[in-house]
Image (cartoon, coloured by chain):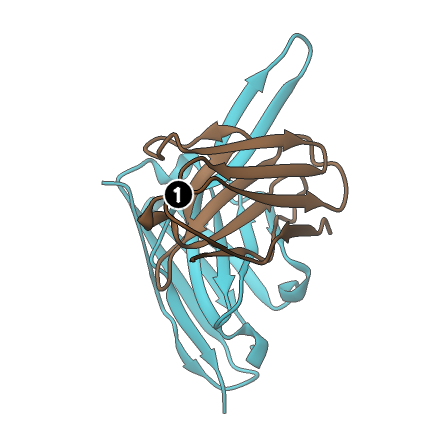
Amino acid sequence: EVQLVESGGGLVQPGGSLRLSCAASGFTFSSYWMSWVRQAPGKGLEWVANIKQDGSEKYYVDSVKGRFTISRDNAKNSLYLQMNSLRAEDTAVYYCARDQQLTVTSIDEVYYYYYMDVWGKGTTVTVSS
Amino acid sequence: DIQMTQSPSSLSASVGDRVTITCRASQSISSYLNWYQQKPGKAPKLLIYAASSLQSGVPSRFSGSGSGTDFTLTISSLQPEDFATYYCQQSYSTAWTFGQGTKLEIK
């Protein structure tokens, strides 16, 4: 069974740090981009970051740049999110998700479509004093 | 960043109704548009990818269309289990963004 299980959430004071983990199973983890997505209480979804298969490319939403770091350990089938300088507005449920790729080839171009097809159940981060 | 705007933000409908949700991008995103369904306390679920491709296992009453800046998600005949919040999401740019969501409620 394809599965993602997040852990590491909890209560942390403003300015503090937390490291989230996501354990993958049931698929070849090293073959996929992976993402973190968060959802503040009562709010919508916000994509946070993603990372290429070998960790050589990483992208972030502007609001976390310089504070959060996404990483992965393919030998351990694990994804991480190191969160520093936490703020109250970082309070959310954090989901990890698998980025699936669809390749479409036309006569002279190749198109890569990405979408998040497998999601974990999430881990809750609360930033409060 | 590319802004995604959904309309309406909420919608009341009855079982058996045909429902359409709209998503508009702040710039052209070709067909790099996905739709998700989320129920309270649960993780999102992928419904449609690349604007119009139905994810495996998703009922055929769900369909997606559009290209460029304007997209729609249609549910042809609402079922009780379809009452949820729906999100569009673009993967055209390296910074992915979601729409604000459309909450579909029972009339």
Label 1 crowd bin: few (<14), some (14–19), many (20+), radius 10 Å: some
Horizontally, residue B76 falls left or right of residue A51, namely: left
Image quadrant where residue A48 sits: bottom right
Choose between B49 and B77: the one closer to the eye.
Answer: B77
Q: Position of residue A67 (x, y in %)?
A: 61, 68
Residue at the image point whose x is 49% and y is 87% from the top: A128
Q: As displayed, is residue A126 above or below residue B27?
A: below
Q: Name the colour assigned to chain A in the rendering.
A: cyan
Q: Position of residue A15 (x, y in %)?
A: 57, 83
Residue at label 1?
B78
Q: Chain of mark 1?
A: B
Residue at the image point whose x is 32% and y is 33% from the top: B57
Q: Secondary structure at mark 1?
A: loop
Residue at the image point whose x is 63% and y is 31% from the top: B66
Q: Position of residue A100 (x, y in %)?
A: 46, 35
* Amino acid carrying mark 1 in the image: Leu
Q: As displayed, is residue B24 above or below residue A80?
A: above
